[in-house]
Image (cartoon, grey):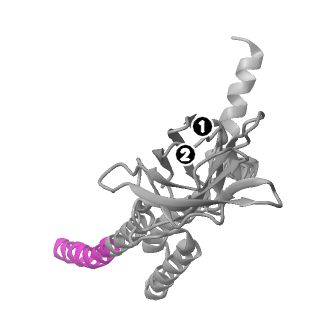
Amino acid sequence: MPSWFSSAQRLIRSIHPKWIAIVLFGLVIVLIAIGFVYATTSAWRAQESAGLSCGSLSVDAPHTYIQYSIKDQAVEPYFQGSIFINLGEASTPLQADVVTTAGRTYANTVTHVEFFRDEQNKTFWMRKESSEVPFVRTSGSARDFPFDSAIVDFDTTFQPSLPIRGLVLRNFNPSFYIPCNKVVSAIGPEKIHLRFEMHRKPLVQLMALVIIISATLFVLIIPFSVKKDALPTSVASFFFSVWSTRGILASEMKVFPTQFDVAILALCVLLLLLIGVRLLLWWVKPAVTDREENLAVRRR
């Protein structure tokens, strides 16, 4: 057996297991800190790199396009939005009906639009954006917060046909971003097909996960680490703090309850159950102690 191997064995035996546990625990803490920094910076870059608009415009005349503006997420499974059409100098009808398909069990939306010639800009376009147009999601729900990203897939038809050659997709929702590389569109004079994804901003998801993980740790620590006299105060503080912290993300939620709320409720119930286990142990321990003392007296 090599001498270096024997020396290594003696060195390992001389190390106290306590120090090994401390080193491993410190390593886990460092890895968690590095992972958190990486996740935060990645989430920030992901949402900052996403532009406010996607789409493509025609280089050759006529420079016509339709603009879809995506706004707030509604309580029902759709995003509120609007439509704006610019017809450039093309010779077109002065009015038309724009039909936006909905899918699921929702009815299509018919938007009557009127065009006027803007002499200053030498173009035909709408006087203003259309009234509200619901863009129905084909997946997920607002109750899935913070994982309520969605896919929106719909068709737009024109009656009569319009010489649309370009498409602009603008995002006015501060809680979601649209990855432009996943936008799929097919443009025609009578029909436009558009498919895009609304992604919940990663920082919001990260914040929600940190709150849930932190609350879980407190649920596991409070029942068995807090002294008996301080237990009611600690439990009350936990309830108030966890629901107050939920208020930080309240502006991001359109419905109640969400998956996030169900997770908080489950943690509260788990805390009560663990406290019940601790109380049961308190009651059992004196009974066992008394029984052992009685047995000891009888043996004497």
Q: Tell me if mark 2 has few (under 14), some (14-19) or many (20+) residues whose alpha carbon lies within 10 angstroms of its own.
A: many
Image location (x, y in percent) of residue 86: 67, 52
Helix, strand or loop at mark 1: helix
The span picked out in magenta is 276-300
Q: In the displayed structure, would residue 71 be above or below residue 20?
A: below
Outermost right residue: 120
Q: Is residue 260 visible?
A: yes
Residue in the image at 38% along x and 70% along y? 257
The verdict on residue 72 being magenta is no
Is residue 293 on the magenta stretch? yes
Q: Quadrant of the C terminus?
A: bottom left
Q: Which of the two labelled residues, at mark 1 and mark 2, occupies the earlier sequence position? A: 1
Residue at label 2?
197
In the depicted structure, whether residue 110 falls above or below residue 233: above
Which mark, residue 182?
A: 1
Q: Is residue 82 visible?
A: no
| Magenta-colored segment: predominant secondary structure | helix
Does residue 57 lie above or below 271 as drawn?
above
Q: Residue at x 44, y 61 (%)?
A: 142
